[in-house]
Amino acid sequence: MELRKKLIIDTDCGSDDAMAIAMALRDPRYEILCFTTVTGNVDARQAAQNTLFTIEEAGSYEPPVYLGCETPLLVPFVGAMETHGQDGMGDMGLVPKRLKVSEGNGVLKIAELLRESEPGEIDIITLGTLTNIALAMRLFPDEMRKVGRIVMMGTAGLGTGNVTPVAEFNIWQDAEAAKIVFEFGVPLMAVGWDACIDDAMLEQEDLDRLISSGPLGKVMVECNRVLMSLNRERFGRDCLDMADPAAMAAALCPECIAECDDYYCEVETAHGIAYGGVLVDYYHFSGKPANCAVCSRLNPSVYKDYIFRTLGA
Ligand code: RIB
Ligand code: CA
């Protein structure tokens, strides 16, 4: 059997993270060494409980979950409860039945796993703010330089922000951390929010297929019910912009990618109207070398088929 690619997944597990986590757990080509949680959608402790619930629901193997940083580096925690619910999972009372958070700090665990790895052996996928990754880079630069690549759900890609006209939430909730990550110098791919909307939006027929496929597909849609009601207002119909599943698909199933190019990217940390925006130097005005591959569009049918295949729908 071909060696499985090793992954660390860092998450602020809200309801769209949950779908992405279940997808990754059920793709046999990858081995998730651990999950680390970070404050973003909800606080890192709640994100850990949501991750444990999702691992149980996915019915696959059960990697350890470690608690990471519980506050952004400098800015206050705001969260995204209006999008994912107070508990991050649609306020349905979804709790793990059996699994517990593992002993040890998530940032230290990332460094430990990389220290023990061969260069390039482990990829990191981030689904939340970049606080843990930034701290690992500051505290353990030699270890972090051994990472294969970091694939993030983050930035507005080549489109509009989702918390301000220019800023996407994962960057906006800790732009100082994001600046550290973008300037560190390891291979990065940022999957922008624009990759999960328009023709990549999960529409009613997609949602019906997931709901009718069984308990996992059903709960992965239902836990996104707060986002669904928000979208009824924002887009005028039942639909789900699944940002983390889009990033997971781009990371684990590159055939899903329709547009992805290398650009010089810079994070705005000045506390003005553009805070948390990531300037993508599309026309190379800066003359600076590219530091990030920006994935701005997925192939809708390939992407959705990947979701259905991994979730058993
Ligand atoms: O902007 C969308 C991102 O912010 C997703 O990762 C969502 O879970 C929140 O973390
Ligand atoms: Ca997330």
Image: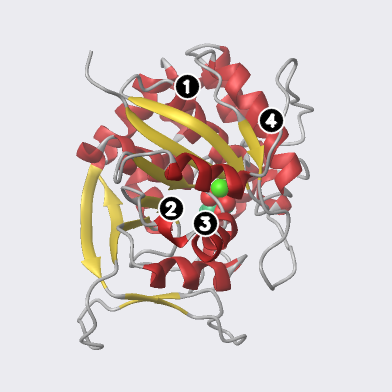
Residue 231 visible in the current orientation: no
Circle 2 — which element?
helix
Q: How many marks?
A: 4
Q: Going from the N terminus, do you reach mark 3 or mark 2 first?
A: 3
Q: Residues within 10 Å of mark 3 (few under 14, many from 20)?
A: many
Identify residue for label 3.
Answer: 133
Residue plotted at (48% across, 39% down): 113
Identify residue for label 2.
Answer: 143
In the image, what residue type sits under mark 2? Glu
In the image, is residue 269 above or below residue 257? below
Q: Residues within 10 Å of mark 4 (few under 14, many from 20)?
A: some
Q: Are marks 1 and 4 in contact (CB under 8 Å)?
A: no
Q: Residues within 10 Å of mark 1 (few under 14, many from 20)?
A: many
Identify residue for label 4.
Answer: 102
Question: In this orientation, which residue lies closer to the viewer: 18 or 126?
Answer: 126
Q: Going from the N terminus, do you reach mark 2 or mark 4 first?
A: 4
Residue 48 visible in the current orientation: yes
Q: Going from the N terminus, do you reach mark 1 or mark 2 first?
A: 2
Discs 1/4, front: 4
Discs 1/2, front: 2
Q: Is mark 3 within 8 Å of ligand 2?
A: no
Query: What numbered label is drawn on residue 226?
Result: none
Discs 3/2, front: 2
Circle 4 — which element?
loop
Q: Going from the N terminus, do you reach mark 1 or mark 4 first?
A: 4
Circle 3 — which element?
helix
In the image, is residue 171 above or below residue 62? below
Residue plotted at (56% across, 33% down): 18
Q: Are marks 4 and 3 in contact (CB under 8 Å)?
A: no
